[in-house]
Image: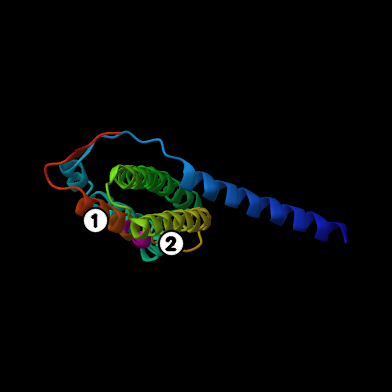
Amino acid sequence: MNWMVAFAVLLCTAVGAGLLWLVRQIGSVHTHLPVTADWIDQLALNRYDAMTRLLDAPDAQFFPAQRGPSRRVARQLRRQRCCVFCQYLRCLQADFRRVTTAIRVLLVQSRYDRPDLARVLVRREVQFAVMMAAIHVRLFLYRWGYGGVDATGLVQAFDSQRLELRALIPAAATLRA
């Protein structure tokens, strides 16, 4: 009976920590603007092409199937790939936050009320945060040799946010906040 209580407390703590992390991800904005149309165009998706292929499951299964490498070398390779992937993930998250902040500033400074865009913005932020949490879980499993990590959905979510901002900012406009 005591182990059930301990498990329930541990599970509630983990869920609470996850929810706290999710709220912090949505609410934190530590970005620098000015944002220009050129800056938005520099946020091309090809920056994240390597990220989407770095931890693919077929690639992860190829290395251990070879005769030569030991388990230690395979673990080291997985760990290194996870570190590189995490760096890409931090850059993607920072870019997403910058784009989201720019859209928020545009909403605040706009002469017209855009509740539809505000709803879409919040929904995309929540979706991005949930996808980030799922990626971190998959990354943890990958690090221990289970499966791969597919980040294409996360990159697509960023791209839709970037395209929304690009549509809002005329080519010659500059936004300062």
Lateral position of residue 100 relative to residue 165, left or right: right
Q: State the count of labels.
A: 2
Q: Magenta stretch containing residue 164, yes or no?
A: no
Quadrant where the N terminus sits is bottom right
**Relative image position of residue 69 (x, y in whole percent):** 42, 54
Residue that appears at 46% across and 56% down: 126
- Of 139 and 35, nearer the camera is 35
For the residues labelled 2 and 1, the Cα–Cα distance comes to 28 Å
- Relative image position of residue 11 (x, y in whole percent): 70, 56
Q: In this view, which residue lies farthest toward the right? A: 1
Q: What residue span does the magenta drawing correspond to?
A: 151-155
Label 2 amino acid?
Gly
Q: Residue at x 33, y 55 (%)?
A: 114
* Mark in the foreground, 2 or 1: 1
Q: Is 3 in front, or is 81?
A: 3
Task: Identify whether 33 is placed above or below 42.
Answer: above
State the image quarter where residue 163 is shown: bottom left
Overall secondary structure of the magenta section: helix
Q: Position of residue 132 (x, y in %)?
A: 45, 54
Instruction: In this rendered view, identify the residue nearer to me: 171 or 25.
Output: 171
Is residue 49 visible in this depiction of the protein? Answer: no
Q: Earlier in the sequence, mark 2 or mark 1?
A: 2
Q: Secondary structure at mark 1?
A: helix
Taking the image as drawn, is residue 50 in sight? yes
Tag 2: Cα neighbours inside 10 Å, few (<14), some, or many (≥20)? many
Query: Label 2's element?
Result: loop
Residue 163 circle label: 1
Look at mark 2 in the image and give the residue it sits on: 148
Residue that appears at 59% across and 47% down = 20
What amino acid type is highlighted by mark number 1?
Leu
Badge 1: few (under 14), some or many (20 or more) residues near its Cα, within 10 Å?
A: few
